[in-house]
Image: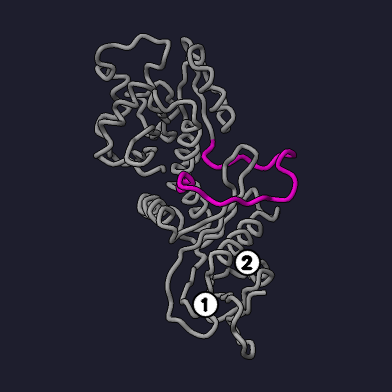
Amino acid sequence: MLLPATDADLPFLRAMLAEAAFPPGTPRPADPLADDHVARYLDGWGRPGDLGLVAWEGSRRVGAAWTRRMSADRAGYGFVGPDVPELTVAVAPADRGRGLGRALVGGALDQAAAHGTARVSLSVADAVNPAAVHLYRALGFTEVARDAGSLTMTATTAPPPPTDADAGEPVARDAGAADGPALARLREVMFMGDGLAGRPGWVAPFLTAWTDGWSSGAWRATVVDDIRGRPVASALAVGSTVAPAPGREQGRAAHIGSVATELRWRRRGCARAATKALVDALDADGVEWITLNATPEGEALYASLGFTASTGARHRSRPGRRRAPVVGERERR
């Protein structure tokens, strides 16, 4: 699970900073954070713009990633400019080689994008850490400078546009616990269309709510990945209970509140794939009543999946309703 970093995580972040600053194969001083150039990555943590994620496995922290804006007079090793946060990422030694680094880097990019940050930078000692360089390049980082055995790399926080390798029918999958930051990024894309973007105070509560909701089964989502494994479309549902009625005798309901596709990935069937997979999963779970709010652009898609219009929403029901069709309801076929 990827959860927002809090003050309680600061000792662990310091331990991860030491791991990032002095990777295996480099000498490590007795007090790794005594070096001001290293310490500035966490000094005064919690100032505006500081964003972090901690990877949890059960009750154990296993890795962390965070981004922080630096100033030219107190720059980090990967400083590009005051508007480009620097990324720090590390995994606990005992937990390396399990894909946690990829999840953390992708999550940090997603978290930054959800907060309106377009680009991040990092510094990596390529001579002693070639595996990290390979990972960063696979996730879209490119080299912008080299100095004393280290590379400075930057990446955009949104997934790159599709390539020929992305061609074909989009395939959706169930979102997992670690997909919270990607779902947040895609919600921010959705908010752009509503004129609500640029107010990121909801991101940290959303990440916590996703983790809790996914763990309990009350929330579920589907995503479509690009070939690099970064989600480019999503559909999210929150389960609820409504008053039982004919056709929904158990009162099991869900609201689909987030269908979004990255701008450069639209008109490729990604939203359809994610939404259909989510509706099918909800049907399989026994959900009897599904609602969503549709924009005019999305009405045709939702109508093709069995939703019909009512005041302010579209609805879809399971079998059992045996009366004349009314606006807002549909028997599941």
Is 296 left, or right, of 183 in this rendering?
Answer: right
Q: Residue at x 43, y 77 (%)?
A: 242
Q: Over which residues does the magenta segment extend?
A: 156-181
Q: Amino acid at mark 2?
A: Gly
Q: CA distance from mark 1 to mark 2?
A: 14 Å
Q: Residue at x 53, y 64 (%)?
A: 285
Q: Say which mark, if any, is on residue 312.
A: 1
Q: Is residue 163 magenta?
A: yes
Is 16 left, or right, of 189 in this rendering?
Answer: left
Disc 2 marks which residue? 298
Tell me the element at label 2. helix
Q: Is residue 154 visible?
A: yes
Look at the numbered discs 1 and 2 and tell me whether their residues touch, using CB distance below 8 Å: no
Relative to the observer, which residue lies in front, 270 or 248?
A: 248
Q: Amino acid at mark 1?
A: Gly
Q: Residue at x 37, y 44 (%)?
A: 3
Image quadrant occupied by the N terminus: top left
